[in-house]
Image: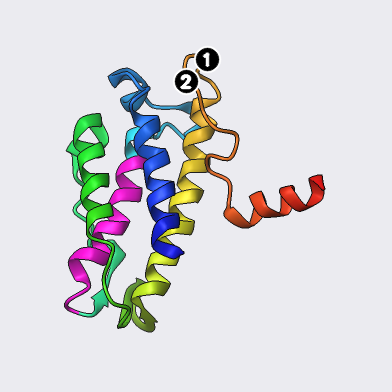
Amino acid sequence: MLIPSIHKTLNELSDLLTQFTDSDYTNPCFGLSNATIGEHTRHIIEMFQCVEKQYEGGIINYDARKRDYLIQTNISFAKEAIETVLNQLDKPNKNLQLQQIVDGEELLIDSNYNRELLYNLEHCIHHQALIKVAILQMDHIQIDENFGVARSTIEYKKQCAQ
């Protein structure tokens, strides 16, 4: 269920990108502290790319992202990057370590592939919620009410409606 959920979430993002003009994608948004939708999209993609590129070595370091300017400025390239991520998700679960420098000290925390995928799914939804803040200022973009909403919140709302 995890990988299909990631597919659903990233496909929602990819579909949304088709509605943007270059200006929509690259203009700073006051509500996002002058970040762009493209920057948030790049961040989502690159976090998944970290897991993919570092999977074999067994140590995941999210600070070792490429920060590819093309992803944040070129909608077609971003959509291709999402498609590549989706095509590379299906790997066996295995133990991994998460490497992070916190206040100058290196931490190595035990994790596994599925846990990192789940983290990235939740992280993606969080950034989609931020993207939604920018989109709500644009009256020419159609967005699903559940875009950027955690799956648990969607389920909770369904239960409350019954």
Q: Residue at x 37, y 42 (%)?
A: 11
| 75, 104: nearer the viewer | 75
Q: Is residue 120 left or right of residue 85?
A: right
CB contact under 8 Å: marks 1 and 2: yes
56 magenta-colored: yes
Q: Secondary structure at mark 1?
A: loop
Q: CA distance from mark 1 to mark 2?
A: 6 Å
**Which residues are drawn in magenta?**
41-57
69 magenta-colored: no
Image coordinates for residue 30, horizontal then vertical, percent: 48, 27
Image coordinates for residue 60, horizontal then vertical, percent: 28, 72
| 40, 122: nearer the viewer | 122
SS assignment for the magenta stretch, majority:
helix
Q: Is residue 39 left or right of residue 154?
A: left
| Whether residue 60 can be seen here | yes
| Whether residue 36 can be seen here | no
Amino acid type, label 2:
Ile
* Callout count: 2
User: On screen, 140 above or below 82?
Assistant: above
Q: Residue at x 50, y 18 (%)?
A: 138
Q: Residue at x 39, y 35 (%)?
A: 35
Residue, disc 2: 141
Residue, disc 1: 139
